Image (tube, rainbow, N blue to C red):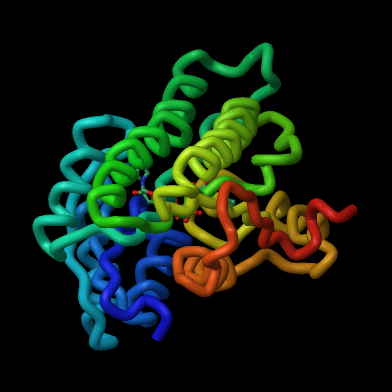
Amino acid sequence: KSLENKAALVTGAGSGIGRAVAIGYAAEGAAVMVSDINEQAGLETVALIEKEGGKASFFKADTSTAEDNEALVKATVETFGKLDIACNNAGIGGDAAETANYSLESWKKVLDINLDGVFYGCKYQLAAMEQNGGGSIVNMASIHGSVAAPFSSAYTTSKHAVVGLTKNIGAEYAKKNIRCNAVGPAYIDTPLLEKNLKPEQLEALKQKHPIGRLGTAEEVANLVVFLSSDKASFMTGAYYLVDGGYTAV
Ligand code: NAD
């Protein structure tokens, strides 16, 4: 197993991609701190991991606050003795509107969670990993870390910024044995999409992927697990797509 004896944390692990990453980490032997703002959803993920014989605990955290990110790292180190791996995954889509009509409220909320939340997470995770002699961080960006999502300016901005933050951390921490990468999924079949799109919009979206379908959370988790493991030892400060060809055309 590629993550034997590793201690990991995953934010937004109560649903979709985050849940699949938490399950993927545990399946590869890591002890996983499952975190989410939604306690019930997070506890369900813990139960799914334990059912398969994996090791997991839950810690409730709202990633849009620095305090909760700090407390999450502290709880992980207290529970598992250290922090080797973190996946900053929690994120929201926000309102759909042309930029001139984009509400100030939604802009702030999306940036608070999708960008500030990832910065806060990295800030405290890096300190814990430095003490531990190394580690690996994977930040959840999107294809909209490199191409536009019309009518979602806040989302596109937040994901491009996450790619930039990731490159900076990769450059700053490479000599300290900490790697940091970002992942860029295209449209993945998760509750986030169901919340934001009508069925006919979903069908049109599928056609934007040369592969002809949406991705699965597991297909994203496979990449995240790989990047988190020592198999990706020469990969840092980069952004990796998992997009069914979306950005190739
Ligand atoms: P989802 O809505 O299924 O799950 C998101 C989880 O994050 C939920 O459990 C929710 O409770 C939690 N969450 C929301 N706000 C939070 C906060 N402030 N603090 C802690 N937890 C919070 O979404 P998903 O589709 O699995 O998306 C996960 C990540 O992947 C997001 O960053 C999203 O932008 C990104 N992404 C998703 C897609 C897609 O098509 N679904 C594509 C590319 C990138």
Residue 154 falls left or right of residue 48: right
Please, is residue 39 above or below residue 230 in the view?
A: above
Residue 225 falls left or right of residue 159: left
Say which of 94 and 175 sits in front: 175
Quarter of image, res 214? bottom right
Quarter of image, res 6? bottom left
Report the residue at 25% width, 56% height from top. Answer: 132
- Seen from this angle, which residue lies furthest front? 175
Say which of 30 and 97 sits in front: 30
Report the residue at 71% width, 50% height from top. Answer: 201
Q: Which quadrant holds the N terminus? A: bottom left
Can you see residue 199? Answer: no
Please, is residue 21 above or below residue 136 in the view?
A: below
- Seen from this angle, which residue lies furthest left? 78
Could you tell me residue 220's position as x and y percent?
56, 65
- Seen from this angle, which residue lies furthest right? 249
Please, is residue 135 above or below residue 158 in the view?
A: below
Report the residue at 75% width, 60% height from top. Answer: 206
Can you see residue 125? Answer: yes
Could you tell me residue 111's position as x and y percent?
47, 27
Q: How many marks?
A: 0
Residue 108 falls left or right of residue 86: right
Could you tell me residue 182's position as x and y percent?
56, 50
Report the residue at 27% width, 42% height from top. Answer: 127
Could you tell me residue 189's position as x and y percent?
58, 63
Quarter of image, res 123? top left
Please, is residue 31 above or below residue 191 in the view?
A: below
